[in-house]
């Protein structure tokens, strides 16, 4: 699959006076075996190694430098002697913490630098690879004449050479004078004693062919590969041949069919599969581990804007915004926050649906060094108030339709001014709509933005579209570490009050890269995502926002899910990837005449937030001819941790296997550190780079679920089979013990029996006083409660027969459709479900009907 190399680029300071920073691409996967360092030649740049970086970064650490004066590195006026470049390389390796000997690869004059470094630092280089390198570098007379021109003239020529030279002509003049023309390495080659590979382009005419061949002849025991049908840029022109040669030379693949596997490698692989039995079931192209870029999350947007500046990033009801403009708008919003006094680490709450303003304010908040706090748009007022006070949000960004609620919250603030909220930025749907739709919205009596004119002028009230455009589109100059806090996301609260989960830039970048690698066939700059799952939910944030942004995809934004409207968008935009929840797929499956909307454009769907019924999966795949796989995650893990393979073996009823660089195990329900054998029920535990920092201002709750060694107790009861596929049984908080001590019972035990009854449409079981109570939604014909109890008696042991059956018209649900069991229990305990019948029987309990 394609890798966005720009995400792995960062700067390394190699000099203070003058200040010189080199741009370095560094990809370091988990447990890499070797470190490759690539040096380009005269007029080159780091991305000339893109095919080698992509090839070897799945298992090895790879580093490519823009040497000083080249690419994105600093371009000082002087300091281009051989010793300057060698000092730069040494400082880069030290800064990146490269301690073990490296495989040093140099192209053309980069080979000269590699040879010098290997001679001077023999303990730091294990193998040397020279590509199209010579013993001396004499340019042809025309080039030498051009480089003798005054620097002022060469600067005028620079704009015309920018697309094919990695350095401006005046810098190349300094390079040639101080390094190239003065270097003669014939004697150095004779002194090399480390394993060396020389790769030649058979048709290379930049230098005389005998000079290339002499290099291999002088180096003791050097291996030579002459690649046919290639010239000087052999690593670009014949990349596969060069990659094979490097792999054989560094023992990354067999040299011939008769070579045997190294016993140590076999043992290591066996041990790895023993601890991670799911690895053999990864789809082709999905790596076992991924290297996590050492960049803040907003770099995803900046990188996409650099690679695809004119590609449409967002489409909202016909309004289109390019990646370049989106990046500029985010920078403007960052400057708005800075002008309001927001400092690094301050919290900015975003209470918005999937509209452009949410994307802009999210990335703008990160660019300002602040922390984005997400809460669901339909959060109850009291819970919203609690979360605002809990996180200490200084700024709130929300729709004008929420004005009355926000005004009340502001009015109820502590009279001493202790509440943190200082500013509210209002926006409405019309701010980013085509003109015709904006006019229609403004004249509608039900317009969400109709209250804008009624909002009084207060110094704490601001309007999004007014404050944005007075600001610079240049991002604030801030040092933001990948370990800094990026997001506080409140959990769904299905079994307890929502807690603020702290996710760092590293956590979110990691989960983005992991999820993206799960779709190896996704193509950068060519995908279209249907974004209906709310970004305010952790699943939507990663799967529907960060992943498509990282791919440079087109995001079709939908503020809410209305099946006919969504189908019309599918027909118009032909999305290729659709992250969703089972309820969405059910609604589409059941819609009359759904095929006429052209939903066969969808080739991949990752379903999350709730179990995906096999009937729903099969029906949707038949309609789209794409792949729909069930995944699993939790806010505390960024959130995605498991998924079924898109094209490989899928297991019905399972959440699939862990994503790359993710470990998972099932531990004893009472002893959270004791792993249980495959097939046994226990609590799912996860470890990986996506696991949260902890809960906001709640170290006690953090300590309960997050072990010092990085393992996160998910609170979900699960099973793992012998092939590493996991199945969720229930929330641990939902299970109960009918007798003490005894075997635990789970809602699923009872619910599956109730689902066997044709009249039962949905069922949710809650244990109250160690006895199950069944809440049931029926189809048209409602059965007698005694009939349900009688059926359960025949199918279940006495202790699992529901004490009560309560018929309801609907369940309390989270914003993405999860049943809120704690709310069911609360309503029952508050006697909100009044009995119409009370028959007490010996083993069934009271039978209630609402």
Image (cartoon, rainbow, N blue to C red):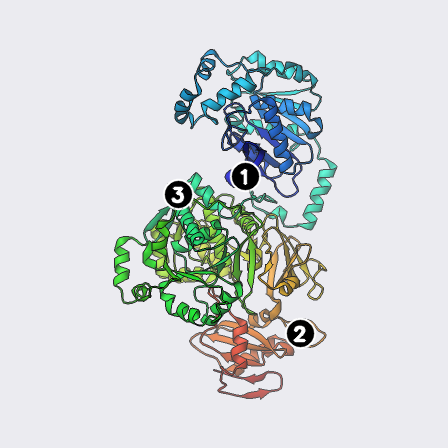
Q: Residues within 10 Å of mark 2 (few under 14, many from 20)?
A: some
Q: Where is residue 190 drawn, in percent x and y?
A: 68, 16
Q: Secondary structure at mark 1?
A: strand
* Residue linked to disc 3: 324
- Depth check: 100 or 715 in front? 100
Q: Quadrant of residue 432?
A: bottom left
* Residue linked to disc 1: 10
Q: In the rendered view, would you say 283 is above or below 201? A: below
Closer to the camera: disc 2 or disc 1? 1
Q: Secondary structure at mark 3?
A: helix
Q: Where is residue 786 drawn, in percent x and y?
A: 53, 83
Q: Where is residue 756 drawn, in percent x and y?
A: 53, 71
Q: Return the mark for residue 303.
A: none
Q: In the rendered view, would you say 215 is above or below 323? A: above
Q: Residues within 10 Å of mark 3 (few under 14, many from 20)?
A: many
Q: Where is residue 350 drawn, in percent x and y?
A: 45, 59
- Judge whether residue 420 can be spotted in this image: yes
* Residue linked to disc 2: 737
**Would you say the residues marked 3 and 2 are in contact, meaning their CB atoms lie under 8 Å apart?**
no
Q: CA distance from mark 3 to mark 2?
A: 57 Å
Q: Specify which label sits upstream in the sequence, 3 or 2.
A: 3
């Amino acid at each position: 699959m394609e890798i966005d190399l720009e995400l792995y680029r960062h700067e390394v300071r190699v000099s203070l006076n003058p200040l010189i920073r080199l741009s370095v691409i560094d990809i370091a996967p988990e447990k890499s075996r070797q470190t490759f360092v690539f040096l380009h030649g005269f007029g080159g740049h780091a991305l000339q190694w893109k095919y080698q970086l992509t090839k070897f970064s799945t298992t090895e650490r790879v580093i490519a430098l823009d040497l000083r004066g080249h690419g994105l590195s600093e371009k000082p006026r002087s300091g281009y002697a051989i010793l300057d470049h060698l000092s730069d390389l040494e400082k880069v390796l030290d800064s990146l913490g490269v301690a073990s000997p490296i495989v040093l690869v140099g192209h053309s004059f980069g080979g000269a630098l590699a040879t010098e470094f290997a001679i001077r630092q023999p303990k730091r280089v294990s193998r040397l690879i020279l590509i199209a390198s010579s013993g001396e570098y004499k340019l042809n007379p025309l080039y030498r004449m051009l480089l003798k021109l005054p620097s002022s003239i060469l600067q005028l020529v620079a704009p015309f050479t920018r697309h094919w030279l990695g350095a401006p002509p005046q810098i190349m003049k300094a390079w040639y004078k101080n390094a190239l023309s003065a270097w003669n390495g014939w004697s150095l080659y004779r002194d090399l004693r480390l394993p060396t590979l020389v790769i030649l382009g058979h048709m290379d005419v930049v230098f005389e062919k005998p000079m290339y061949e002499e290099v291999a002849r002088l180096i003791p025991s050097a291996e030579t590969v002459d690649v046919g049908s290639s010239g000087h840029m052999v690593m670009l022109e014949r990349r596969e041949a060069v990659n094979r040669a490097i792999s054989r030379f560094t023992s990354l693949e067999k040299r011939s069919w008769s070579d045997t596997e190294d016993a140590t490698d076999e043992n290591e692989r066996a041990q790895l599969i023993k601890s991670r039995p799911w690895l053999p079931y990864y789809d082709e192209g999905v790596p076992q581990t991924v290297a996590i870029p050492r960049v803040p999350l907003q770099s995803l947007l900046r990188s996409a804007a650099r690679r695809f500046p004119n590609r449409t990033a967002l489409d909202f009801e016909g309004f289109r915004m390019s990646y370049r403009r989106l990046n500029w708008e985010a920078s403007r919003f960052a400057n708005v926050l800075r002008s309001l006094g927001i400092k690094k680490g301050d919290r900015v709450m975003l209470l918005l649906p999937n509209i452009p303003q949410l994307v802009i304010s999210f990335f703008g908040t990160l660019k300002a060094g602040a922390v984005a706090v997400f809460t669901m748009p339909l959060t109850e007022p009291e819970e919203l108030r609690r979360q605002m006070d809990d996180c200490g949000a200084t700024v709130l960004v929300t729709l004008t339709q929420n004005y009355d609620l926000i005004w009340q919250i502001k009015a109820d603030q502590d009279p001493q001014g202790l509440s943190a909220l200082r500013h509210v930025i209002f926006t409405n749907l019309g701010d980013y709509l085509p003109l015709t739709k904006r006019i229609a919205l403004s004249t509608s009596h039900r317009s969400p933005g109709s209250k804008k004119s009624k909002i009084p002028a207060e110094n704490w009230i601001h309007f999004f579209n007014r404050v944005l455009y007075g600001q610079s589109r240049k991002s604030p100059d801030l040092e933001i570490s990948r370990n800094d806090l990026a997001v506080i996301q409140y959990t769904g609260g299905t079994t307890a009050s929502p807690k603020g989960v702290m996710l760092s830039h590293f956590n979110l970048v990691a989960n983005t890269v992991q999820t993206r690698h799960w779709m190896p066939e996704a193509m950068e700059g060519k995908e279209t995502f249907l974004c209906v799952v709310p970004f305010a939910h952790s699943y939507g944030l990663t799967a529907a926002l960060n992943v498509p942004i990282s791919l440079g995809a087109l995001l079709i934004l939908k503020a809410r899910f209305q099946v006919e409207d969504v189908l019309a968008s599918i027909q118009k935009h032909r999305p290729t990837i659709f992250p969703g929840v089972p309820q969405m797929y059910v609604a589409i499956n059941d819609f009359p005449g759904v095929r006429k909307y052209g939903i066969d454009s969808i080739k991949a769907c990752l379903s999350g937030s709730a179990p995906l019924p096999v009937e729903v999966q099969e029906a949707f795949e038949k309609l789209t001819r794409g792949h729909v796989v069930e995944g699993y995650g939790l806010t505390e893990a960024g959130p995605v941790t498991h998924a079924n393979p898109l094209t490989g073996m899928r297991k019905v009823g399972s959440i699939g296997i862990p994503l790359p660089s993710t470990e998972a195990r099932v531990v004893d329900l009472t002893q959270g550190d004791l792993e249980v054998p495959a097939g046994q029920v226990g609590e799912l535990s996860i470890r990986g780079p996506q696991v949260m920092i902890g809960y906001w201002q709640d170290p006690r709750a953090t300590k309960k679920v997050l072990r010092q060694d990085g393992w996160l107790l998910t609170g979900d009861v699960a099973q793992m089979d012998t092939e590493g596929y996991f199945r969720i049984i229930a929330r641990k908080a939902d299970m109960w013990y009918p007798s003490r001590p005894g075997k635990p019972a789970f809602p699923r035990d009872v619910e599956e029996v109730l689902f066997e009854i044709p009249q039962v449409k949905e069922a949710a079981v809650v244990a109250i006083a160690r006895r199950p109570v069944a809440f049931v939604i029926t189809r048209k014909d409602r059965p007698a409660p005694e009939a349900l109890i009688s059926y359960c008696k025949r199918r279940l042991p006495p202790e699992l027969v529901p004490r009560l059956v309560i018929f309801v018209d609907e369940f309390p649900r989270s914003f993405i459709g999860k049943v809120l069991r704690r709310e069911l229990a609360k309503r029952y305990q508050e006697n909100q479900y009044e009995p119409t019948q009370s028959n007490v029987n010996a083993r069934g309990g009271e039978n209630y009907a609402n």
